[in-house]
Amino acid sequence: MKTPREISHTLEILVPPRIHFVSNDGKYEVKKGSTVTLECKASGNPVPFISWSRKNNLLPSGEKSVEGLSITIEHATRNQAGIYECTADNKVGSPVTKEIVLNVLYPPEIEVERNWVHSGEGYEAHLVCLVHAEPPAEVLWFRNTLRLDTTDNRITEARGNRHTLILRKVKSTDFGNYSCLADNSLGKTRQYVELSGKPNPAEFRSGPLSSYRDSYNISWSVISYTNVEEYKLYYRKLPVSELQPSPRQQQSKHSEVDNDTYGGVHGGRNHLGDGRGHMGMGYGVNSRGAMMAYDWHMVIVQADPSGVMPSSSLLASNKGHNGQSHGTVHWGSLMLKELEPASDYEAKVQARNRFGWSEASKRFTFSTRGFENSLIEPSPVPAVFSEPEVRDLGMTAASSGGSANRGAAAAVVIKPPTEYIAALVIISLMVWT
């Protein structure tokens, strides 16, 4: 009798993935600073692998996706809140995805759009606070310690997290310090905004390299709704340094000014063509080899009422001014004389209107020409000028004690004689040939 043969067949059934568990039913609500672990479990044949991603955003690690049964978020912040997606895939059928919503509770956080807002009488002003809070916060506005209610001239507006206090027609009494206070069940916070009629910080407009060896025509502009009455111009010589290129070697350099008290300011009319003074010694090397700083020279410059134009004209010329779009642009300039050839200087300026002095401008550096690269003779002999010379008439500077004799400044355009023009043309031809 023959032995029967047995044949065995193994049948493996492929099963598409199915997510059968997500932690906390897919909803998490944690406080800021907490640690939370999101879990996801799936079945299928073959065993599916699980990946994590975040809807319309990157994961807290900065990655687009990661693999694993869970993902842990430490020290949760509002920026880590959102919808997290757990995806299971085993290449059988289509991947499946479940969502877990993470909501992070935190006390209010406020950013001010601008902490200093410039305006003028009769204009509209907007003070803006960007408020983030969960649960949502109640936002109140204050002037100093007085809570502000809405009136015909003063309204509040809320669009999403943007809260705005609108003064429809500013009066001089409206200038001052404001604050927005945001409050929810987890805490409260406050941020401050100043509404000011003072001028904006000025910006220098002159180029970094003078046309002359011993003088420089410096100019600036400032936006102010109210007429500018005067300027304080500070300047001083910079040290010779091999570490940084001078404006003769590069374009104009600006650096933020720390609004310090201008120690070492010398008054008098030195270096302005009216009277004599001395340049403070410093940023040189003393007998012990230590670096010393040159003293600042301060000059009071009276504003010229005719040197104004709408700020829209400045913006149209692609020369925007501190991001401002309203107000009037006021221009100032001064010819600094008796400077040293082939030297670097820095300057800063403040402007005053009837509401007070502006913050100091950014520092601006400029250079005088050296003997080797100037075809223009130094003053006092009249020379061929590539730009109008501004002579200061009756200009005086504030004394170091703080008092000032304020005169008027006027600009005189010196037209060069014909023979000087001819001489410059001949010399230019000789140089080019």
Image: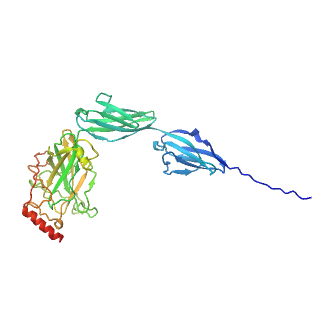
x, y percentage for residue 349? 20, 49
Observer-nearest of 178 and 145: 178
Is 55 placed left or right of 277 in the picture? Answer: right
Toward the bottom, the furthest residue is 433
The one of 16 and 181 positioned closer to us in this rendering: 16
Work out whether residue 206 or residue 416 is closer to the camera in this orientation and state it: 416
Residue 164, percent from left and from top: 34, 35
Position of residue 128 in the picture relative to residue 288 (left or right): right
Q: Is residue 148 left or right of residue 64?
A: left
- Where is the N terminus found, in terms of image quarters? bottom right
State the quadrant of the C terminus.
bottom left
User: Looking at the image, which residue is at 31% across and 37% down?
Assistant: 126
Residue located 53% across and 50% down the image: 65
Between 210 and 148, the one nearer to me in the picture: 210
Looking at the rendering, which quadrant does residue 21 occupy? top right
337 w.r.t. 168: above or below: below
Q: How is the image coloured?
A: rainbow
* Residue 95 appearing in the image: yes
